[in-house]
Image (spheres, grey):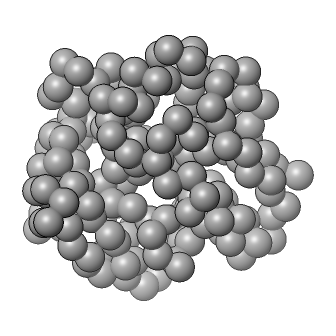
Amino acid sequence: MLKAGVIAVQGDVAEHADAIRRAADRHGEDCTVESIRSAGVVPECDLLLLPGGESTTISRLLAEEGIDEEIEAFAAAGKPLLATCAGLIVASRDAKDDRVSTLDILDVSVDRNAFGRQKDSFEAAIDVEGLDEPFPAVFIRAPLIDEVDAAVETLAAVDDRPVAVRQDNVVGTSFHPELTDDSRIHGLAFFS
């Protein structure tokens, strides 16, 4: 049985846990999901999710709890990791904000809240590499991926701007895939 961990210092933990379970079921995998709030659990996981929230708070709490180094080691070990919205910011090489201590596990540069404020939130059906039909992406104060290293594959774009990327075992999205009933992004990141 696979063990998935959802970093639970802030963000949509329950929604992601449900999406992971649905994706696992759809792919014929048995998977338990654990919320992670302290060090020591990440190394036990087979899959890891770094959710959205507020990136400065997330990065601070990860460091305070000692989870940041465990996430870096997890990614370096080649295990599947999905980072969404603020999780993408924290996972990036550069958040363009000194208040965010990035993990540098995804070789992209990210501009926080570049798609606008809360009132500028939107949904869009986007084509995602590896999915056979458009995905209903939900963008809430979404970051913009503005630089992508050659080692990073762009999986989806909105107005020619990357919104989903993959670098080896790490997938990052600007949007919130957990806010839909569609678990295909979780499936793509973890079970494909």
Q: Is residue 67 above or below residue 167?
A: above
Percent of width and height locating residue 83: 45, 45
Q: Nearer the viewer, residue 102 or 55?
A: 55
Q: Is residue 188 above or below residue 63?
A: below
Q: Quadrant of the C terminus?
A: bottom right
Percent of width and height locating residue 135: 39, 77
Percent of width and height locating residue 107: 32, 32
The residue lying at 65 percent from left, 25 percent from top is 38
The residue lying at 62 percent from left, 31 percent from top is 37
The residue lying at 12 percent from left, 50 percent from top is 114
Residue 186 position by quadrant: bottom right
The residue lying at 81 percent from left, 64 percent from top is 29
Give the residue at the far bottom of this rendering. 133
User: Left or right of 162: which side holds 166?
Assistant: right
Q: Is residue 42 above or below residue 28?
A: above
Q: Nearer the viewer, residue 191 or 25?
A: 25
Q: Is residue 2 visible?
A: yes
Q: Is residue 77 visible?
A: no
Q: Is residue 62 above or below residue 118?
A: above
